[in-house]
Amino acid sequence: MTRNGFDRREAAVLRKLSSPAKIQQFLDAEIGYNKEKDGDTCRSPRRVLRDRVAHCMEGALFAAAALRVLGFPPLIVDLESVRDDDHIVAVFQQHGCWGAIAKSNYAGLRFREPVYRTLRELAMSYFEHYYNPAGEKTLRAYSRPVNLSRFDSIGWMTAEEDLWAIPEYLYTIPHRRLLTAEMERRLNRMDRRLFAAGRVGAVE
């Protein structure tokens, strides 16, 4: 076993993911989208590697573990929505700016280059791409970064059990609102072209 708990085969795969962009490419090309609702499974990074499937929570956990192997802290952020599912992203900093890695069935809710000066800027970069099937723009708030090292005691990177403690913890922490009530009242529906573009390649 390596110091992160992965076996040699698993560690060899992770070592090839030598940048945040390569982690995202691996999630996109090698890991299928888990069509089960987020409440049905919460796989560890080891299980994601084995099963080759993930939804956004599982993808964020995998990305955080891969970032940790690269020497980054394993951080995730919860993007909170209304009339929609929350979205979880793994975040990282380079040269003082924030970027993100994510698994999503929506094309616009995945990778972000590390060019955002604040977490609020990063969260707002998802706003126009975050919508429900009715075409409503649904992103409303974001959490502080959660360092997953706090869950090392349950072996979050390699556990065989579902990691429900992590999403349960995300529900308990404060979130910062992105919009005022007046802004929410004035929101328009999604542009049809952007709606369609966001669904390119989606798993139905």
Image (cartoon, rainbow, N blue to C red):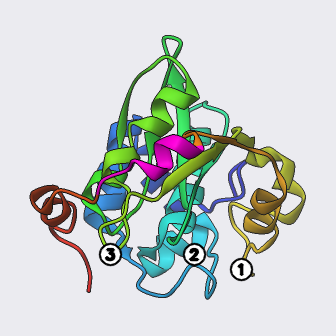
Report helix, strand or loop for mark 1.
loop
Which of pointers 3 and 1 indicates the residue nearer the eye? 3
- The quarter of the rendered structure image containing the N terminus is bottom right
Give me the C-alpha separation between circle 2 and circle 3.
33 Å
Give me the C-alpha separation between circle 2 and circle 1.
7 Å
What secondary structure is the magenta-colored segment mainly? Answer: helix
Q: Position of residue 185 (x, y in %)?
A: 47, 51
Q: Position of residue 154 (x, y in %)?
A: 86, 65
The three-letter code of the residue at mark 3 reads: Ala
Q: Nearer the viewer, residue 80 or 96?
A: 80
Residue, disc 1:
160
Queried whether the magenta region covers residue 183, the answer comes back as yes
- Which residue appears at 9% of the width and 59% of the height? 193
- Farthest right residue in view: 153
Please state if 157 lies on the left or on the right of 65 as rendered. Answer: right
In the image, which residues are magenta? 181-188
Q: Is residue 168 above or below residue 194?
A: below
Q: Are marks 2 and 1 in contact (CB under 8 Å)?
A: yes
Please state if 35 lies on the left or on the right of 182 as rendered. Answer: left
Please state if 138 lies on the left or on the right of 2 as rendered. Answer: left
The three-letter code of the residue at mark 2 reads: Arg
The three-letter code of the residue at mark 1 reads: Glu
- Farthest left residue in view: 193
- Which residue appears at 54% of the width and 40% of the height? 179
Q: Nearer the viewer, residue 32 or 155?
A: 32
